[in-house]
Image (cartoon, helix red, strand yellow):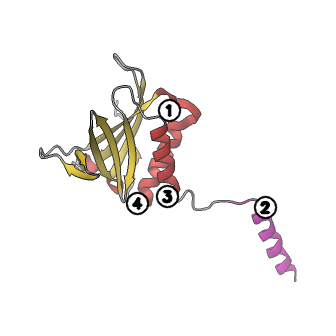
Amino acid sequence: MKRVSKILMLLLLLSLFPINLLGQTKNETKVWIESTINNHSYRSLYPRHLEFHGNYLVYITKIGDTNFYGKIEIAKINQFEIQSFKGNNTQDGYKIYLFCKNNIKCIEEGKIINNKFIPSKDPNINYLLPIYLELTFSENNLPKRMEKAIKHLVKIYGGNASIYKEVF
């Protein structure tokens, strides 16, 4: 009887303090990253936004009437860096750099035509995808929170990303 009452007491206590042992879901993480980046997107020169398409992160820049994209498979993000920058003739902001594993080229670039990704005819596949954000991204500890979210998302997709560190 004591054992049953202890179990009931433990269940009661756990119900009073809900704990998410598994962390954020894949969808919750994607929605948070997408909305945070799009809410702070650097629009000084061209409109930009981020979207997720299946296993891919897609960063879109509109120049004139054309949408250009950079696309990376989430699991292939090996390292990333979040840093502030000083604009020359534009405003200051933040950059998120996403790096491919071992600097192997894994980022497809091209145009979006009729809602289809059309890769560039030039073999312009890179190993680095930059994402530009307004200075407001510094609010509410967003850079540190974004670091955690990116690491979590890559892990969910089977990758293992770390924060890029300069040697010197």
* Residue type at numbered disc 3: Asn
Q: Earlier in the sequence, mark 4 or mark 2?
A: 2
Q: Earlier in the sequence, mark 3 or mark 1?
A: 3
- Looking at the image, which residue is at 86% across and 77% down? 5
Q: Amino acid at mark 1?
A: Phe
Q: Is residue 52 visible?
A: yes
- Image-quadrant location for residue 83: top left
**Range shown magenta:** 1-19
Q: CA distance from mark 4 to mark 3?
A: 11 Å
Label 1, secondary structure: give it. Answer: helix
At x 13%, y 46%, the residue is: 123
Q: Position of residue 81 (x, y in %)?
A: 39, 38
In this rendering, position of residue 162 left or right of residue 143: left
Residue 108 location (% of width, % of height): 23, 48
Instruction: Name the residue nearer the viewer: 114 or 69.
Output: 114
Q: Mark 4 and 1 residues: CB-CB less than 8 Å, in contact?
A: no
Kind of residue at disc 2: Leu
Q: Which residue is mark 2?
A: 16
Identify the residue under disc 1.
137
